[in-house]
Image: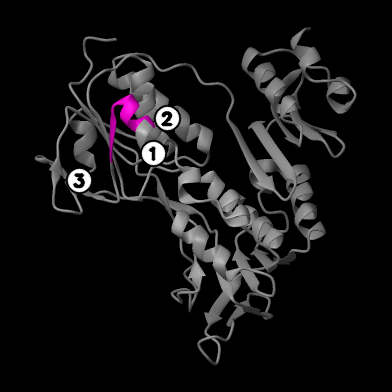
Amino acid sequence: MSAAAPADVLIIGGGIAGYTTATTLRTLGYSGPITIVEHDPSCGDHPPLSKNALVDGAARADLDFATPQRFDELGIAVESGVAATGVTAEGVALSDGRVLTAAALVVAVGAEPNRPTVPGADDPRVVTLRGYDDAVRIRAAAGPGSTVLVLGGGFIGAEVAASLRQLGAAVVLVDPHELPGASVLGETLAGWMRELHAGNGVDLRTTTVRSIEPGSTADAPLRVTLGDGTTVAADLVVAGVGVSPRTLAGIELVESAGGIVLAPTAHWDAARLDGADAAARLLGQEPEPRGAAWYWTDRYDAHIEIVGELVGDGEEIVRPGVAVFRVDGDRLLGAASVNDPNTVRAARRIIDRGVSVDRAALADPSIPLRQMLKG
C-alpha cells in the first residue's frame, strides 16, 4: 500500500460506485477508517428495482450490497438514512445537523430521474423509479386490471413496462421514436426489443405526452393526452425520461482539496469501475486498464447483454434471433446477444485483445465465438 494513503476516507453515496470504492480500498490493503454516508435506509443495488423488486416483490434487504455484519467485518461504517447537504471548509454537513470530516473525500451521489415537464406532471400519480420505496409504490398500483402509462422507452422505461406486464397490468409505452434506443443499440437490436414488447401485449405509441389531467373523482384514472391527439385513461404514469446529476452544495471544494468527485454514468458496470478507479487513486496507484464497455437489460424471459459499440463505424452482421455484431474490416467493435451471455463474454475478450474475426463465422450460429479466441 502506498505511503500516501489517507488517514481516513469519507464516501458520500452508497450506490455501486461508493460501495465499490470502499470495498476496493480494503482489497488493495487499506486499513484506515472508511465511512459511507447514504441517504437511503441502506446501501442497495439499483438494477433489481425495475426487475426483482417490481416482479417478485423482493425485500429491501434482498437488494442490499452487504449485511450490517459484513460491513462490520470489512470495517466500513455506514451512516444510512441521512443525507449530505453540502461541503464546506469545516467538512461535510449532514441533514441531521452533524458535520463529518476526513482526510480524503469521495463524492458518488449519482443522478436523479428527470420528471416530465408537461402540464399535470406534478400529480402524485406521476412517478419515477429511483429507490426501493418507488418500486413498492409502483408495484402496489399495477396489478391485474390496472392501466399504467410508461413515458420513455429507454432502459428504465422498457424494463418497467416489461415488469408491469408480468404483474398483469395493461401497459401503454409512449416514446417519440419508432425504435427507442436505436441511436445506441442499432436498428436491429432495437427492433428486436420493440417486437419483444409488442409480443407481450404492450401497447406501443410513437408519440409524446401533451398533458395529464386528474379524473372526475379522486379514484378515477388520470386522463393523459398524447401528442397525436388520442387519450389514455391511466391509473399511474411512470416516467423514464432520463436523469440529471445530483447536486451537492460546495462540491467544487472537494477536488480542490484533493478529493474525488465521480460523475454519474449510464450503466452499472461503468459506475463500479469508477469506484474501483477512485480507490486506486486514493492510494496513489494507477487504476486497472478498462476493457470495452459492457451492460445488460432483462425483459420478460430475455436476458440481453451488450459490449462495445453497436452504432457508428463499420457495418452490422446478424446471427438471426441470437446476436448482432458491428465490425470494421476484421475488427470487432461491438456485440449483443439474447439469452447467450457466453457470446458477449467471448466478444468482450476479442475486442479487448484485438483478435481478428471472420465475418462468415460471426453470422453462423453453429460456430461458438470463443473459437475465434483460439485462432
Residue at 47% x, 40% y: name it. 265
Check disc 2 and report the residue beneath it: 274
Q: CA distance from mark 3 to mark 2?
A: 22 Å
Q: Secondary structure at mark 2?
A: helix
Single out the mark in the foreground, 1 or 2.
2
Q: Quadrant of residue 353?
A: top right
Asked if labels 2 and 1 touch by Cβ distance under 8 angstroms, the answer is yes
Of residue 52 and residue 354, the one placed in the foreground of this image is 52
Q: Position of residue 175 (x, y in %)?
A: 65, 62
Place of residue 85 in the rendered image (x, y in percent of width and height, measured from the top left)? 22, 51
In screen coordinates, is 36 left or right of 61? Answer: left
Type of residue at label 1?
Answer: Ala
Question: Which residue appears at 60% of the width and 60% of the height?
Answer: 152
Mark 3 / mark 2, whichever is N-terminal: 3
Tell which circle, 1 or 2, labels the residue nearer the N-terminal end.
1
Q: Name the outermost residue toward the left.
A: 90
Which quarter shows the N terminus?
Answer: top left
- Image quadrant where one finds the C terminus: top right
What distance separates the C-alpha of mark 1 from that of mark 2? 9 Å
Q: Horizontal and vertical percent for residue 298?
A: 67, 45
Is residue 77 magenta-colored?
A: yes
Q: Which span is picked out in magenta?
A: 70-78
Q: Point out the frontmost of discs 3 and 2.
A: 2
Q: Secondary structure at mark 1?
A: loop
Query: Which residue type carries mark 2?
Result: Asp
Asked whether disc 3 touches disc 2, contact meaning CB atoms under 8 Å apart, the reply is no
Up-down: is 88 above or below 138? above
Residue 184 locus on image (x, y percent): 64, 42
